[in-house]
Structures are given as structure tokens and as C-alpha cells.
Image: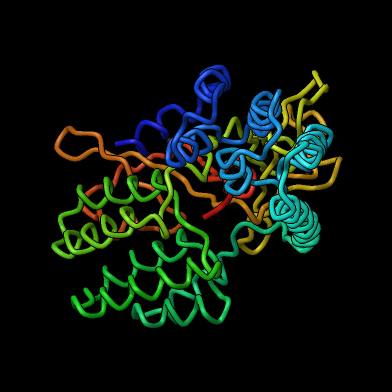
Amino acid sequence: MMNKLISALLPKDNSTFISSYMSNIEKLEFGQIDAMLDLGGTDTKTFLLIILQNLTGKTKFDENIKCLLTNMNLALCSEVNEELYLEVMSKISELPDISVTDLKYVNRLMVDTIKMVTYNRERKRERTTELYNGTEFQNLLGICKTMTDVVKAVTEGFLKSMFAVIDLLLNIFHEETPNTDEIKLFIAAVDGLCSDGKLQKVSLNYVNLVIAMLKCSNQKQSEQLITLLNDLKNNAKLCTSNEYITIKQDRIITQGSFRYAFAFGHPLSGTCTRSNSHCGFLLEFRPPSILEMCTRPEDYHNSGVHLHDEISAYDMFWYGTFTGTFKGTQVSALGRDTWRKKWLSHITDWTTTGFFVEYNVADYRVAKRK
């Protein structure tokens, strides 16, 4: 229930409520602090100010402030609000009665933060602009005939997200339904791979869309796949309701090359002063079937959006949505492949309703990734 409430409140500005709720942090339990961090989304400033407020007049390092710092994404705080972050750490270090143990702990937090900031910047330089390669995906469809094949593809580095895993499951279950033992082994395997950081989680929104599509299918194996997907979405290691932002395509640009425009303000971009266009990005299909994020300045001329360096294709998953009718009722489907034609073959009047990007903001949330 709490997770559903937090998911509903995340899109809103909760800073006033959070500041009031945490005005006296000493009275809160650790679980309440964690809930506020989840509710905080990408808002680092509010929590740094809360710490400063709660340090006023104090002489010792409070355990609840320590809990808050331990569970905060301090690397993000340092990058987005460096001066405020350093002020917090300085105030704590200067507490008159801080213990040697606590002082060492604060110093260790700062060292770990510097390491994480450096790691994030190096990883950003290595990231690709490519979102989707149709040829590679078709090859994976040919290779991954079983759930064991999918796990092997992940361990060998061919698959990096649960989104792609679900796409492959749609193909596997359509051809031949795995047995119960295979499904249990598969869930245990991908659970471990996500925990080890070899797989990105899938968004709850995407899983729900796939389930909704399968509920309209007239194929009997859809029920087994729905059961599996429900198991996946109830596993916090595999599925998340608050680590992705769903961005709908703003418009399609047909002048010159065919490009999809998305408006999106990245958490690390801060306050943008440009008024002649929106923060965002452009996606473009290039031969033979590669979807890439446009990075050249000329690509954005007269596009209505401008690109910030922080935006990365590595954090994106792209898909389209479609509608058709069956016995007078509108049916929705999605996918990057022809899943609607396989699972909903009784519907033929499909029309495209939009294109979306699920953007992974787990590294840009104030709550530390768990």
C-alpha cells in the first residue's frame, strides 16, 4: 500500500510536505525516513536543507541523521548541489561532541562519494547513443529459444535489461510454453543477475502494459505468461514503480530526416535558462534498423528541443503503442516487435497511438539504489 501511495505522489512537488514531516528528525523511525527518501524522487536540495535544519543547535551526530545520510545518494547530492553538500559535511564534522568513530564514518562517506562521482562520470563517457538494433534483436530471437538461453545471453553480456528479457519471453511462450520447474529456475536466475547489477530492472508501467495486452489474447499460453509476469512485477529486485520516468513522444519531425522529439528535463541538468526550446532529445532510425539518440547540434536546429550532456541512451528503453478493435471494443498493445500480430492475431486494424521512452533515473534519485 505504501509503495502505491509513493508512486502516486512521486510526480508531484512534495518538498513542502517532506520538510514539514522531517522538521524534527529525532522523532522519526528509520522506516519513516526511508519512506520520505522514496517520496523525494530526484530532489536532493530538500534533504540537504533538512539535515542543516536539524543540525542547528546540536552538539552530537544524531543517529537519525546518520540513517538519512547512509541511505541518500550522496554522489547525486554532490553533483547537483555541491556547495550545499559540502556545507552539510562541514557542519557535521564541526559538531563539538562528535565522536572519533562518527568522524571517521563521515570521512568514509565523503571518500566513497568522490569515488562514485568519478565512476559515474567515467561510465557516462563509455555510454552509447544506440537504443535499439533491429538486426541484433532478430539474432537474439533466433538464439534464445528457451529461458535457459535468455539467462545465458544475459551472463554473456548480450542482454542488459529486463525490458529486453520480457520481449524475448513473449517470443518463447508464443512458440512453446516452458514448464513450471523451468520458470522457477528462470526467476531465481534473473533475480540474482539483477542483484549483481548485470540486468536493469523493468518498469511496472511496461509490465502492466504487456499484461493488459495478453489479457486480450485468445491463445491459451497467455495465462501462463501473465502468471510469470505477475511474479516478476511483485519482485522488487526485478521490477520497480519509481525508478523510471515514462516519456511520451512530443512530436515527429519530418523535415530532413524522420526524427522523434521527446521533451525531458534530466535531474542533473538543473535549472535550464534556455527559453527558445524545451529540454529533451531526438531519436532517429538509421539504416538498416538502428534507433539512435541524435547528438549533433545541427540535428536539433528548429526541432523545438535541445540536448543536455547528461542525457544518455544507455538509460532509455523505447517502445510503441497501438490500438485495434475486437467485437466493437478497443484493444491496446505495445512492443518493439510484432507481438500484437502474434498474440492478438484476431485483430487486424492496428493503428499507432504513440511512441514512448522509459528513462531510468535510479542513479538520479535522492534515495540510494538498493
Image quadrant where residue 57 sits: top right
Q: Does residue 125 appear in the picture of this structure?
A: no
Which of the 4 image quadrants contains residue 80? top right
Q: Look at the picture and state if 159 lies above or below 333.
A: below
Residue 54 visible in the snapshot? yes
The quarter in which the N terminus is drawn is top left
Q: Give the x, y percent position of residue 43.
A: 63, 31
Residue 139 image position (x, y, % from top left): 51, 76
Residue drawn 28% across and 50% down?
211
- Nearer to me, 265 or 28: 28
Q: Nearer the viewer, residue 1 or 190?
A: 1
The picture places residue 243, in percent across and down from the top left corner, at 51, 45
* Residue at x 34%, y 43% (from the top left corner): 350
- Residues 341 and 262: in front is 262
> Height in image: 56 above or below 315?
above
**1, 333: nearer the viewer:** 1
The image shows residue 365, relative to residue 36, as above or below, that is below
The scheme the figure's colours follow is rainbow
**From the viewer's perspective, is 96 left or right of 43?**
right
Q: Residue at x 81, y 34 (%)?
A: 87
Q: Is residue 20 left or right of residue 298?
A: left
Which quadrant would residue 48 be assigned to in this image?
top right
- Residue 179: image location, x then y, percent: 19, 78
What residue lies at 57% left-to-right and 72% top-to-bottom? 136
The residue furthest front is: 97
